Amino acid sequence: GQNIDQPTEMTATEGAIVQINCTYQTSGFNGLFWYQQHAGEAPTFLSYNVLDGLEEKGRFSSFLSRSKGYSYLLLKELQMKDSASYLCAVRDTMGGSYIPTFGRGTSLIVHP
Amino acid sequence: EAQVTQNPRYLITVTGKKLTVTCSQNMNHEYMSWYRQDPGLGLRQIYYSMNVEVTDKGDVPEGYKVSRKEKRNFPLILESPSPNQTSLYFCASSSTAIGSTNEKLFFGSGTQLSVL
């Protein structure tokens, strides 16, 4: 199984940069996902990492270090609409199945 | 449009009255899953299915049943709901082709269930 840890809450200022960290322990790592979830809505896919390094997608980037069991999501030029919960999910290949497990999420509050 | 359709969006019921939450996907996905989301606890997996007629327990299966008779449908059944099952429920699906490692989850819009 996995143990996924991410901060419960973060605050940042509009226009700034914020980094949300995620650490994990797993025996059969097969990919790490980040999802965004606005209050009362379904999570939506943001990024995916399976190899070490940085994946950039517009204002959002995600980094992975498999040896350290560590990932971060970087949000640049923050906007008010970025206020949401950010979920780190790790996929494990235990038993030959591709089962993603979610962390508890980081609630990001962006203020003017 | 590729989507996961989940119904109902809101449901209020009483203890012991059987209910079913439906989930359907139109993407021919093999993998489907049910999660519940509670404040401070994140998304917890209830049951999942790797394909038709194949279902497995997740982390919190007690009090729930599922079935996967067709690839597109994965209903969640609460035979005798109790107040501790009051929660926000999400259905999700993805492809899991062997060797495929870039398959994101598509989520339904959620079902807010209240058991009185």
Image (cartoon, helix red, strand yellow):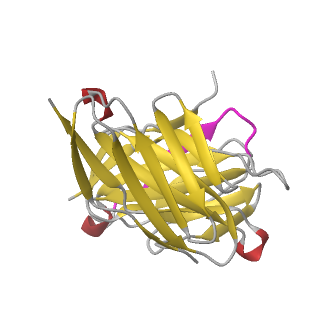
User: Where is residue A35 drawn, in percent x and y?
Assistant: 47, 45
What percent of the width, then of the height, locates residue A40? Answer: 30, 40
Residue B30 vs A111, above or below: the answer is: below
Place of residue B116 in the rendered image (x, y in percent of width and height, measured from the top left)? 20, 59
Name which residue lies at 75% across and 76% down: A95
**Would residue B27 be counted in the magenta stretch?**
yes
Which residue occupies the foreground of this view, B60 or A93?
A: A93
> Is residue B18 visible in this depiction of the protein?
no
Q: How many marks?
A: 0
Magenta span of residues:
B17-29
Residue A28 visible (yes or no):
yes
In front: B9, or A89?
Answer: A89
Q: Which residue does the image show at 36% across and 56% down from the upper left?
A: A105
Quadrant hosting residue B24: top right
Q: Note whether A3 is above or below B94 in the view shown.
A: below
**Quarter holding the N terminus of chain A?**
bottom right
Q: Quadrant of the C terminus of chain A?
A: top left
**Residue located farthest toward the left when viewing the structure as drawn:** A112
The answer to whether residue A35 is above or below residue B36 is above
In this rendering, position of residue B73 left or right of residue A77: right
The one nearer the camera, A98 or B1, is A98
Left or right for B97, reference A71: right
Q: Quadrant of residue B99?
A: bottom right
Q: Nearer the viewer, residue A31 or B60?
A: A31
Please give left or right for residue A81 compared with residue B77 in the image.
left
> Is residue B84 located in the magenta-colored stretch of the structure?
no
Q: Is residue A72 left or right of residue A77?
A: right
Task: Return the x and y of residue A54 as percentages of the image width and height.
Answer: 59, 46
